[in-house]
Image (cartoon, rainbow, N blue to C red):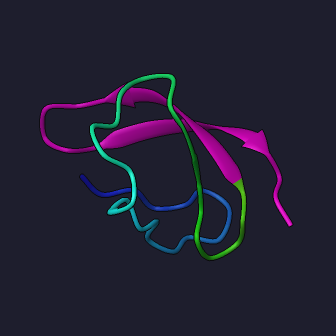
Amino acid sequence: MRLICPECKNEVDLKSYSKLKEGDVIECNHCGITLSISAIYEDGGITTEIVDEGK
């Protein structure tokens, strides 16, 4: 899976999250924004919503 942060446009490191599913909350390791996973697609794409603007 690959996720680009909608805020800072960097790739979010998902290695520390095992078995991601819809509704999980993750944090961008670059800008600190908190994202909620709203959809995971078969091709590995992820759609997220901003939960908190971060640091």
Task: Look at the magenta stretch and give its main secondary structure.
Answer: strand
**Residue 27 falls inside the magenta stretch:** no
**Is 28 or 39 nearer to us in this picture?**
28
**Stretch of the chain drawn in magenta:** 34-55
Residue 35 in percent (x, y) is at: 62, 43
Residue 3 in percent (x, y) is at: 39, 56
Residue visible at 39% across and 60% down in the picture:
16
Residue visible at 39% across and 26% down in the picture:
39
**Residue 45 falls inside the magenta stretch:** yes
Residue 30 in percent (x, y) is at: 62, 76
Q: Is residue 8 above or below residue 48?
A: below
Quadrant for residue 5, please give it.
bottom right
Quadrant for residue 8, please give it.
bottom right
Q: Quadrant of the C terminus?
A: bottom right
Q: Is residue 33 left or right of residue 46?
A: right
Q: Is residue 49 above or below residue 9?
A: above
Quadrant for residue 15, please give it.
bottom left
Q: Is residue 19 left or right of residue 36?
A: left
Residue visible at 58% across and 71% down in the picture:
29
Residue 12 in percent (x, y) is at: 46, 65
